[in-house]
Image (cartoon, rainbow, N blue to C red):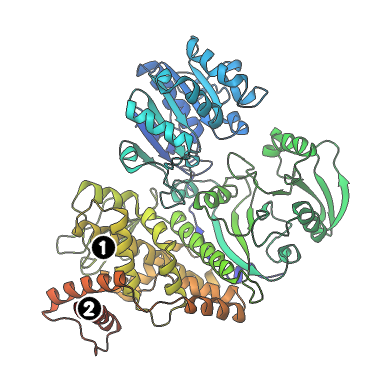
Amino acid sequence: MTNIKSIPSVSVNYACDGSSTRANEMGMRAMQERAYEKRGEQYLLIKSPPASGKSRALMFITLDKLYNQRVKKAIIVVPEKTIGASFNNEPLSQYGFWANWEVAPQWNLCNAPGDDNGGKIGAVKSFLDSADRILICTHATFRFAVDRFGVEAFDDCLIAVDEFHHVSAHSDNKLGTHLSQFIARDKVHIIAMTGSYFRGDAEAVLAPQDEAKFEVVTYTYYEQLNGYQYLKQLDIGYYFYTGSYTDEILSVLNPEEKTIIHIPNVNSRESTKDKIKEVEHIIHELGDWQGIDAKTGFHLVKTPKGVLKIADLVDDDTKRDKVLSALRDPAARDNREYVDIIIALGMAKEGFDWIWCEHALTVGYRSSLTEIIQIIGRATRDAKGKTKSRFTNLIAEPDASEEVVIDAVNDTLKAIAASLLMEQVLAPKFSFSLKSSQSGPVDGFDYGEDGYDPKKENIGFNQQTGQFQVEIKGLVEPKSKEATRICQEDLNEVIAAFVQDKTALERGLFDSEMVPEELTQVRMGKIVKDKYPELDEEDREAVRQHAIAALNLTQQGKKIINDDVLNAGNTALIQGVRKFAMDVRDLDIDLIDRINPFGEAYAILAKAMTEDSLKQVAQVIAGKKVNLTIEEARGLAKRALKFKQERGRLPSLTSPDPWEKRMAEGVAFLARMKAEAANG
């Protein structure tokens, strides 16, 4: 069996101080209390990880809107029927709240028989005409109801959308279109909730003008996991295999860990195109099949360590209903030994709470960042005795004999990008400030053993909020309210766009001649400009610097953890970031810009892939390399102008400094293009 600890992607450790699970006098946990403080907002977006209590937060806010804010009715919209159970009746007053959450049985349409095109649409109208005030239905039921009755039928209602990432601003997304219509009419309240909100994903969730109207409540993964009682460590890794994944799955699957396996989509390279045989093969690799449990429908598989109970959610015949029903039994929550492994294809990604899951194992890359976050969320529940959990992405190595080798390389790059982003999502939040003579310690932050030192660039950490406070020389600070908001709340959005940028990723990983500033300054600068065209040049530079600093500090902290082999299992990312800052002594923005953001990802890739496969990927990418585009040359020329303003001369083509030389090449390239155009 492969030693999976020898090639970690990232390992994040948490304090387990219990703060995220501790309730206040009204029965609210930390995230719920934070959301409730914003209950008066007409449009509210709650971004919070799985298991943080979003459903109950919505109950608290909804009851206040119904009783204290003149909202007539509330419609809770969930993506699928099974998630409707999250909004069953709750005796909130037993825990200190001033009202209970009660939904009349006939108005939880997720429990009603039939499809969404049948009587459920009429039931929505009956609810609107009734004296009752809370309705639960699926996204599909709500879409059809709005189509039939119009947005005006919902005036003075609260529309609460759970798993909001299912919405899209794309014209083909009906729910997204309806929400834009509701916002334009401005006669409803909207609460949107999601654990995985990325505008950098395939489609924007909301149009920018609509999103600007939402007040955002953010509760980070770090805050959530840091405040648990039991779960102390989360590992994320991607691992490569050759041949069939079913033959190699035990190299990353430990049968003694409670695991959810997501087998590949049938259209992916990793799939054998026969999902039933894939499940059979996995079971065969695990041990000797003993039959099916009559009560639960679980497969029973004998191994040297005992009998495994395996739930198969891939086979979509009548047996799956029995398996699903068994997994919803309270015993699945109360008894760790109730089930050992769950195998799924499209299910068990969101709204599926198996608290004992220690390992989310996914075969094949996932193109959607939101989907990856949802899958990881399956393993991040807190449970007694569960101190570690991990996410593994098992990916096929590119094969030179494949006709689709370029597609295979693209899959590999997308998996790396997803891993880089997840490292950022799970890390503490960064707050940066310019180091100056007026700098001083910030209340609530710990600056390490020696405390705050006015003579150096300090890194403080607030254990309670899970936040770094970092001083950097030469940092541009944001001026406008929007740029400040982006630097405080949206850096991961910028990083998501950057790590998914194919040019940046390919060059950062495989171009040995690449100067890091081409990525950190020019490429990231272009991404920020495209993403936030309304910002002026100085604010765009501030956002660029803040984003690249957050990414590079996380990567350098990870590098120190992974290099420190003896302590890799228990060295916190916090200490890694601190040690990097101590090692470099003068932490300035120029130094940060000179770090290749993908350097550590390549180091891990080199350990995870065979040498031949790594060379092949590099060759495929080298074959597509373009020396310089007009767009890149313009970006270099812009940096060359700044260089001239600072030093009184243009960059030199003969400079020994590779970045100065590259800027000069950009200026020369544009001069040649201009001369050629003038000569006809």
Q: Residues within 10 Å of mark 1 (few under 14, many from 20)?
A: many
Q: Quadrant of residue 503?
A: bottom left
Residue 668: x, y in percent? 23, 82
Q: Amino acid at mark 2?
A: Gly
The residue drawn where x is 71% and y is 33% is 329
- Tag 2–tag 1 contact (CB < 8 Å): no
The residue drawn where x is 57% and y is 76% is 607
Q: Which labelled disc corresponds to residue 680?
A: 2
Kindly give the residue lying farthest to the left in the view shown. Answer: 648
Q: Which labelled disc corresponds to residue 471?
A: 1
Q: Quadrant of residue 469?
A: bottom left
Quarter of the picture holding the N terminus: bottom right
Front residue of 534/508: it is: 534
Give the Cα distance between marks 2 and 1. Answer: 52 Å
Q: Amino acid at mark 1?
A: Glu
Front residue of 297/268: it is: 268
Q: Earlier in the sequence, mark 2 or mark 1?
A: 1
The residue drawn where x is 49% and y is 54% is 14
Q: Which labelled disc corresponds to residue 388?
A: none
Q: Is residue 175 left or right of residue 300?
A: left
For label 1, the SS is strand
Q: Is residue 248 left or right of residue 621?
A: right
The residue drawn where x is 57% and y is 79% is 616
Front residue of 591/144: it is: 144
Is residue 599 shown to the viewer in this render?
no
Q: Is residue 211 above or below residue 43?
A: below
Q: Residues within 10 Å of mark 2 (few under 14, many from 20)?
A: few
Q: Is residue 259 above or below residue 645?
A: above
